[in-house]
Image (tube, rainbow, N blue to C red):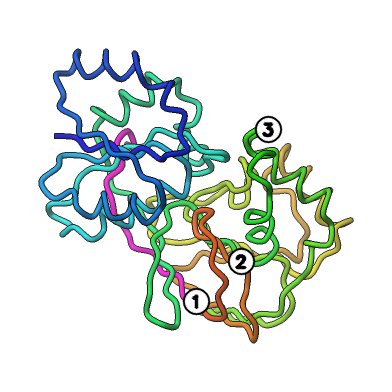
């Protein structure tokens, strides 16, 4: 049995004939559920004991929620995770190369391909609550940009919406004071952004951490210090051509955990899902889930 968790925002019209043909060809039984929120996607995945694999159809937030739910199932019985990218940015799918697959190939990959273990990130709050993310935890300006970009703009131009919204609202480009600690590392000051990366891309394919790997047991933590919009915009544009093009002041740490603290709540997103936090600890969970098609 396969459970398919479909985000309510996904374009389900793309699935009809493609999915039906594949199910008949492979003689598969599928239980299709619609998730109206990340919390519901999490609950549906957590209740998938005895299912062979769980296929998530949606954006990065849906994928992270489903991965979090699967982590509630004991490792030896945890279903394989399949993904069919159908969100605005699909940054995790871009990191893995799955976003380039036509819908039929993405479905085939998710439903029947062999699987290999990948890592997941866990971000913990001071109150003990934890959230799973597959792609990236962002703190500061990118998180504020993600949460304020209007839905109609995202529907109209996809991942490009984040860049357009940022250029039109330069007042969002404000540094935040924070203290950051990781194994062998400490930093304190004003930062534009901290990106705790399991995947490579954010904001519709921007190569935030071009050397990050989803199966190496480490985060790539990218620390962007206080920079002006005039400095950041050319850097962002140049990175589209050369992913390693960035100011020398931008640091990248390869670590299994990182703590971030501030005196006021920091804009934060985990796979695009927003939450303001004053303290957080992100930890890598090596081999947390088995991803279909990742070999």
Measuring 28% from the left and 42% from the top, which residue is drawn there?
81
Packing grade of label 2 (10 A; few <14, some 14-19, many >=20) is: many
Which residue sits furthest right?
230
Q: CA distance from mark 2 to mark 3?
A: 24 Å
Query: Marks 1 and 2: CB-CB under 8 Å?
Result: yes
Under tag 3, what secondary structure? helix
| Part of the protein shown in magenta | 281-295
**Image vertical order of residue 282 relative to residue 146, above or below:** below
Q: Which part of the image, by quadrant, shows the N terminus?
A: top left
Report which residue position mark 3 lands on.
157
Which x, y percent locates residue 70?
26, 53
Where does the image place residue 78, in percent across and percent down from the top left? 18, 51
13 is higher (above) or lower (below) than 65: above
Residue farthest to the left?
50
Q: Is residue 77 left or right of residue 123?
A: left
Q: Which label number is shown at residue 139?
A: 2
- Is the C-beta separation of discs 3 and 1 under 8 Å? no
Instruction: Let me know if residue 36 is in the magenta part.
Output: no
Q: Earlier in the sequence, mark 3 or mark 1?
A: 3
Residue 202, horizontal then vertical, whole percent: 59, 48
- CA separation in Å, label 1 and label 2: 10 Å
Q: Which residue bears the numbered disc 1?
A: 280
Query: Magenta: predominant secondary structure element?
Result: strand
Q: Give the SS element for disc 1.
A: strand
Residue 242 position by quadrant: top right
């Amino acid at each position: 049995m396969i459970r398919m968790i479909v985000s309510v925002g996904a374009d389900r019209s793309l699935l009809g004939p493609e999915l039906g043909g594949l199910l008949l060809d492979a003689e598969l039984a599928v239980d299709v559920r619609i998730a109206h929120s990340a919390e519901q996607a999490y609950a549906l995945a957590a209740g998938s004991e005895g299912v062979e694999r769980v296929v998530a159809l949606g954006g990065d937030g849906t994928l992270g929620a489903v991965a979090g739910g699967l982590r509630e199932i004991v490792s030896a019985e945890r279903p394989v995770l399949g993904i069919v990218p159908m969100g605005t940015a699909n940054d995790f799918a871009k990191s893995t190369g799955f976003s380039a697959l036509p819908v039929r190939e993405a479905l085939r990959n998710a439903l029947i391909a062999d699987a290999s273990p990948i890592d997941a990130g866990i971000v913990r709050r001071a109150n003990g609550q934890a959230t799973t993310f597959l792609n990236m935890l962002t703190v500061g300006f990118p998180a504020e940009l993600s949460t304020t970009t209007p839905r109609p703009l995202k529907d109209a131009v996809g991942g490009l919406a984040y860049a357009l919204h940022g250029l039109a609202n330069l007042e969002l480009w404000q540094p935040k004071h924070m203290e950051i600690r990781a194994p062998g590392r400490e930093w304190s000051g004003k930062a534009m952004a901290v990106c705790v990366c399991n995947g490579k891309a954010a904001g519709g394919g921007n190569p935030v951490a071009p050397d990050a790997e989803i199966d190496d047991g480490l985060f790539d933590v990218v620390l962007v210090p206080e920079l002006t919009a005039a400095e950041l915009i050319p850097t962002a544009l140049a990175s589209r051509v050369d992913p390693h093009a960035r100011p020398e002041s931008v640091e990248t740490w390869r670590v299994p955990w990182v703590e971030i603290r501030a005196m006021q709540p920091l804009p934060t997103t985990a796979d695009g899902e927003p939450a303001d936090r004053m303290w957080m600890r992100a930890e890598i969970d090596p081999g947390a889930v088995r991803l279909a098609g990742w070999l």
